[in-house]
Image: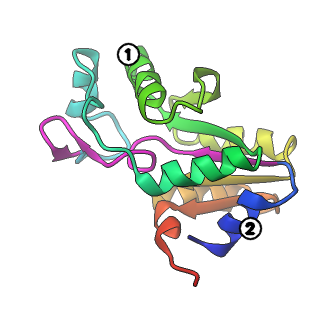
Amino acid sequence: MNKKISNLAVSKKNVLFLFDFDGTLLEAKYDKDTILGCSNDECDVLKRDLEKNIYVGVKPIKKIQILIDLLNQNNKSVKVLSKIHNSMQVLNKIEYLNKEYPSISKNDFIGVVEYEHKTAILEYYSNIYDEVVYIDDHLDTLIQIENNLANKNNINCFHISSLFIDNN
């Protein structure tokens, strides 16, 4: 895992860890084991989410589960910051969290309708916490956040791949 993530996870600072949902907390495989092949706009698989829960049977990312356990042991705040397309998707994502990430309450789920809103949420929390860590699988989202919040030294953006680095 990236050394800065590890250090913040066990630091004495008041740190908030925010995680994207799709492709970060869980594998990006949905609906008959297909990869969610769409842009940031709505796509067919997410529209079908109105009819059924596409998250049933999708595997959680074990490294994230281990990290969240470590964060809980060190009294760090954990929230999920996710793009949502409809109200049924919110319910389905919360149901998934209850099953695979039970330490994350529904009150710690933040849904946004536009990716740009993630920047505002991170900026808000940067005024409350000593450090904010945001982990996402979308490079375009991470770059946008870093560019828009370059003046905020306490916001740390990481791609999910940073969790798979061996720092030994």
Marks 2 and 1, how far apart at CA? 37 Å
Query: What residue sits right under mark 1 in the picture?
Result: 88
Q: Position of residue 97 (x, y in %)?
A: 47, 30
Residue 91 in view, yes or no: yes
Q: Residue 30 falls in which quadrant of the image?
A: top left
**Residue that numbered label 2 is attached to:** 7
Q: Is residue 63 magenta?
A: no
Residue 33: image x %, image y %? 15, 43
Report x, y in % for residue 110.
60, 29
**Magenta region includes residue 28:** yes
Asked whether, in this view, residue 68 is left or right of residue 100, the answer is right
In this view of the protein, which residue sits in the foreground, 69 or 49? 69
Residue positioned most to the front: 73
Magenta region, residue range:
15-35
Depth order, front residue of 102/49? 102
Asked whether the viewer can see residue 117, the reply is no
Q: How is the image coloured?
A: rainbow
Residue 6 vs 13, above or below: the answer is below
